[in-house]
Image: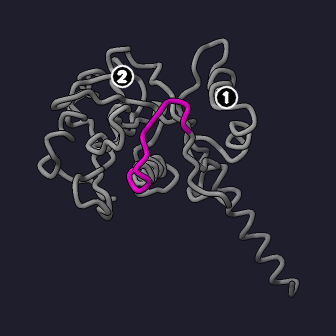
Amino acid sequence: MEPYSFDDITDRQLKILAHTLSTTGGTAEQVHLFKSEKDPFDLYPVDVAMLEPTKFFEYYIVTTVGLSAYKFSSKVARAELIMLLPKEWKADFSKWEYFWPVKLMQDIAFGIINNKASVLPLQLFEMTDAGNPYETTSFVGGIVNFPELFPVEYVDEKIDYDYTRFYQVVPVTKKQVDKIKDIGSDKFIQFDLHDADGPLLNVEVPDVKKNAGKKIDKIIAHNERTLKGK
């Protein structure tokens, strides 16, 4: 995905971004907006944005922009999804180790629309059954939770003629997915995503040096095997 202009988005998408910016005290200049590489839907565009931290809200926010245009059940509210990254996150979109949250949110949104699914709290999105599609991380999906670190007014916003609900996605590893299937989403969120200090709902900054060291070790080991004729 590539950054693009606010001139290219719909009125609903503008209102979605305006709602999050007004809640966090951000400005349009703090938004990195990404248009999908391909638009598999003929009706409404669904894109992803990353909003920089502000003095009122110290996290990066990765958010779907337009998912709420799709509603597949009259009994379930329209929804947008957010993910939180720490303020130390590097918004370097040329490096996959910092860009994958945007891709994960796109994949989850497209999966929801392709399957005509509704978004509900405690819902688990598993992106793969084998391996890891996001390379530099151990995450393979996400679990839906209420955005506890936001003011309660953030959760529901009237956009056009009805309300859109904003949910948070917390990335999970394959090991965590297995645990969720074993003990249930509610217990996982209650005990694994919370401790005595409060909710643990943001992603840790990737240890790029550590990952780079692993790659170098692999190259050295490969060269040694080659020299030994193995």
- Image position of 118 (left or right of 226): left
Q: Position of residue 83 (x, y in %)?
A: 45, 36
- Residue drawn at (35%, 42%), measured in percent from left and top? 64
Q: Residue furthest front?
A: 74
- Magenta region, residue range: 113-123
Q: In the image, is residue 63 part of the stretch drawn in magenta?
A: no
Q: Is residue 210 above or below residue 218?
A: above
Quadrant (top left/top right/bottom left/bottom right) for the N terminus = bottom left
- Residue drawn at (18%, 38%), measured in percent from left and top? 14
Q: What amino acid type should be assigned to the residue bearing mark 1?
A: Phe
Quadrant (top left/top right/bottom left/bottom right) for the C terminus = bottom right
- The disc placed on residue 188 is 1
Foreground residue among 97 and 38: 38
- Image position of 137 (left or right of 60): right
Q: Is residue 32 above or below residue 136?
A: above
Foreground residue among 212 and 143: 143
Secondary-structure class at tag 2: loop
